[in-house]
Amino acid sequence: MYKRVKIKKGDTVKVIAGGNKGKTGTVMQVLRKDDRVVIENVNMVTKHVKPGPSNPQGGIEKKEAPIHISNVMVVDSDGNATRVGRRRGDDGKLARYSKKSDQTLN
């Protein structure tokens, strides 16, 4: 059983620690097993690729590397990094909300 995470694919997040501190991007993938997230255009690494059927030339490509989930925070609609809570909405379903601005997150 994996730990419940408060960040989902498609969320806008801000990096709060590490070499990419201050950068903002959209979550492309959540790796629950490793407690990591892949964020678009953040933590770019250079990978040397051997020639193969899909890439006959080979070469050097840049791609995103995962960041530990504790080093990112969700950004609310005001653009502030915030903690995330859960509460019941009007329809009775659990909804995520920003603890800083008290707004519902989509």
Image (cartoon, rainbow, N blue to C red):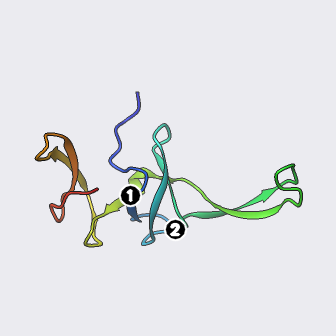
User: What is the x, y in percent for residue 96?
Assistant: 23, 50
Residue drawn at point x = 79 percent, y = 59 percent: 48
76 versus 88 height, above or below: below
Image: 80 above or below 89: below
Q: What element does badge 1 sit on?
A: loop
Which residue matches tag 2?
Answer: 19
> Which residue is more in the foreground, 93 or 9?
93
What kind of element bears circle 2?
A: loop
The image quadrant of residue 101 is: bottom left
> Does residue 31 appear to the left or right of 87 in the view shown?
right
Q: Quadrant of the N terminus?
A: top left
Residue matched to label 1: 11
| Residue at (74% x, 63% y) in the render | 61
Where residue 49 appears, as percent x and y from the top left, is: 80, 56
**Residue 48 tag number:** none
What amino acid type should be assigned to the residue bearing mark 1? Asp
- Which amino acid type is marked by label 2? Gly
- In this rendering, the answer to whether 18 lies above or below 106 is below
Looking at this view, name the residue that lies furthest to the left: 90
Circle 2 residues within 10 Å: few <14, some 14–19, many ≥20: few
Where residue 29 sits in the image (x, y, percent)? 50, 50
